[in-house]
Image (cartoon, helix red, strand yellow):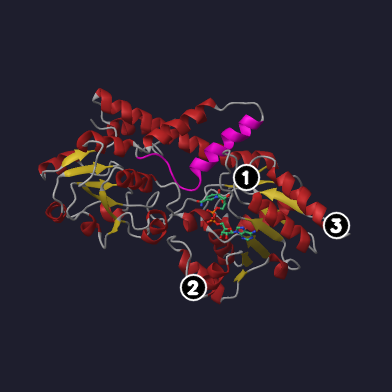
């Protein structure tokens, strides 16, 4: 089987490489020629565990190609995925310009029947727009080509993307006919050897499922952040509350961790886009409006704690920050709460020393020379009045506290992810500040 994936970012590159790993011939298309050139030489544009190995192996085997245009493969492929970005536009909706531009390109190049699949996260109704654009482009060339559209939202998690794609919990495919269903079924069969987990739906439901899933996860996070803040006021410990409620099978233990608010390239924009879609239809999603507001407030939780401890003028103060990525195991800093916190400290006059195991390059684009780029986690702590754990990378879990203490000049520790033990740190002379622990 031959397919194309247009957009070679977190989703497109992982999908393309994983399909190739299953013996499918994949053309990954992107407008970023430097990215394509790097990939041909085995240089990954993103950090994603396990990705490099499968990209290099399948590229060398000739199953994975990197191309600047869909034109070159339009006569060969049975399926083309659209996996370009859908960032927020100025009024909170999803900016579909890249998706619709790709639809036009597909329509201009199509010479044979195929299934056009939106894998990007797109509002309900987008597949219909993609179909109309392609049909218009084909008609403008005086041709009649029977093509199908399908919606196949992606649920991979950055940092675990290869594993998620190779062993998905479920694959959702929205189709409106048997022809597309058969093709998509064949494509995903290799991933379903042990149990079949493809859920076929109509197209609009598939588009909605992606937003509803992210909105639900964001809701759990904001809910727990609200509860955490109340725990602080009441003297309860949110870690214990989390365990106490997470063991109820109706609730489950996942996504109950309070922290600095959700970030990344998906939750913030997808919650916003769903609220926007509802608004356009004259409907309000009041729970999600609250989820967003709580999240906005939570992103300042450390800045508020720091202000309470040191005052609003941080001139002359030094802070060490561990972690800049929006979560561990990724170099993605889009909407990162860590970056937000650093900016707040810098704005209040502090000198900030930052360290992240893999996101330093991406973070430098955001923070420039406003901070000191430390060589190691211990270097970040050097001369600091306070140390902040902002992203829970594994290497931060069990630090040499004596070395940390020796490097710092103060003893304040702000644990934005509740990974440390207050009693142990108190014994070592640190003043511990967690989230949701009074
Ligand atoms: P990304 O920004 O990492 O990658 C997008 C790629 O598309 C870039 O390489 C860009 O150069 C390319 N591109 C833009 N216009 C193009 C065009 N006309 N032709 C060819 N290439 C073009 O984006 P991403 O994080 O991979 O997200 C892609 C989509 O998948 C979004 O809708 C996102 O919401 C969704 N999604 C992302 C994740 C995630 O964890 N990142 C998970 C699930 C779904």
Q: Which sits earlier in the primary sequence, circle 1 or circle 3?
A: 1
Left or right of 29 on screen, residue 112: right
Classify mark 3: helix, strand or loop: helix
For image coordinates 42% across by 41% down, the residue present is 262
Disc 2 C-beta below 8 A from ligand 1? no
Q: Nearer the viewer, residue 35 or 352?
A: 352
Could you tell me how far apart the alpha carbons at marks 2 and 1 are, in whole angstroms?
A: 30 Å
Quadrant occupied by the C terminus: top left
Left or right of 411 on screen, residue 322: right
Q: Which residue is mark 1?
A: 122
Left or right of 356 on screen, residue 10: right
Relative to 409, say whether 52 is above or below: below
Disc 1 C-beta below 8 A from ligand 1? yes
Residue 251 in view of the camera: no
Q: Which residue is mark 2?
A: 42
For image coordinates 41% across by 39% down, the residue present is 255
Residue 411 % position (x, y): 15, 45
Classify mark 2: helix, strand or loop: loop
Residue 387 % position (x, y): 22, 47
Residues under numbered marks 3 and 2 in contact, where contact means CB atoms less than 8 Å apart: no
Quadrant occupied by the N terminus: bottom right
Q: Which residues are magenta?
A: 260-280
Q: Which sits earlier in the primary sequence, circle 3 or circle 2?
A: 2
Q: Is residue 277 magenta?
A: yes
Left or right of 312 on screen, residue 285: right
Of circles 3 and 2, the one toward us is 3
Residue 203 in view of the camera: yes
Q: Which residue is mark 3?
A: 140
Could you tell me how far apart the alpha carbons at marks 1 and 3 are, in whole angstroms?
A: 26 Å
Q: Which sits earlier in the primary sequence, circle 2 or circle 1?
A: 2
């Amino acid at each position: 089987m031959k397919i194309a994936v247009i957009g070679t970012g977190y989703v497109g590159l992982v999908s393309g490489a994983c399909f190739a790993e299953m013996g499918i011939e994949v053309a990954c298309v992107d407008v970023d020629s430097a990215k394509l050139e790097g990939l041909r030489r085995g240089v990954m544009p993103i950090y994603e565990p396990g990705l490099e190995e499968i990209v290099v192996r399948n590229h060398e085997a000739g199953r994975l190609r990197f191309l600047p245009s869909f034109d070159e493969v339009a006569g060969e492929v049975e399926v083309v995925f659209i996996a370009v970005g859908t960032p927020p536009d100025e009024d909170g909706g999803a900016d579909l310009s890249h998706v619709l531009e790709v639809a036009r390109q597909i329509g201009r190049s199509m010479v044979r029947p195929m299934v056009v699949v939106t894998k990007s996260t797109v509002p309900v109704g987008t597949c219909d727009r993609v179909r109309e654009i392609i049909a218009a482009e084909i008609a403008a060339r005086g041709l009649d080509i029977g093509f199908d559209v399908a919606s196949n939202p992606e649920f991979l998690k950055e940092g675990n993307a290869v594993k998620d794609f190779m062993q998905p919990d479920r694959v959702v495919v929205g189709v409106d006919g048997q022809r597309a269903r058969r093709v998509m079924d064949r494509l995903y069969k290799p991933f379903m050897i042990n149990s079949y987990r493809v859920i076929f739906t109509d197209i609009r439901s598939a588009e909605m499922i992606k937003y509803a899933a992210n909105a639900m996860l964001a809701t759990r996070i904001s809910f727990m952040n609200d509860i955490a803040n109340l725990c602080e006021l009441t003297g309860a410990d949110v870690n214990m509350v989390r365990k106490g409620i997470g063991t109820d099978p109706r609730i489950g233990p996942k996504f109950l961790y309070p922290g600095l608010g959700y970030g990344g390239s998906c939750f913030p924009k997808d919650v916003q886009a769903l609220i926007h879609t509802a608004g356009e239809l004259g409907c309000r999603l009041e729970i999600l409006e609250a989820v967003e507001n709580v999240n906005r407030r939570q992103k300042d939780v450390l800045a508020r704690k720091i202000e309470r401890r040191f005052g609003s003028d941080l001139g002359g103060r030094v802070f060490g920050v561990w972690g800049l990525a929006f979560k561990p195991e990724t170099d993605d800093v889009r909407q990162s709460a860590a970056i937000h916190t650093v900016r707040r400290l810098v704005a209040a006059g502090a000198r900030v020393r930052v360290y992240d195991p893999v996101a330093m390059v991406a973070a430098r684009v955001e923070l420039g020379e406003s901070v000191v780029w430390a060589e190691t986690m211990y270097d970040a702590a050097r001369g600091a009045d306070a140390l902040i754990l902002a992203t829970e990378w594994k290497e931060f879990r069990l630090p040499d506290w004596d070395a940390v203490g020796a490097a710092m000049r103060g003893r304040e520790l702000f644990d934005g992810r509740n990974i440390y033990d207050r009693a142990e740190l108190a014994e070592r002379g640190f003043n511990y500040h967690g989230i949701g622990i009074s």
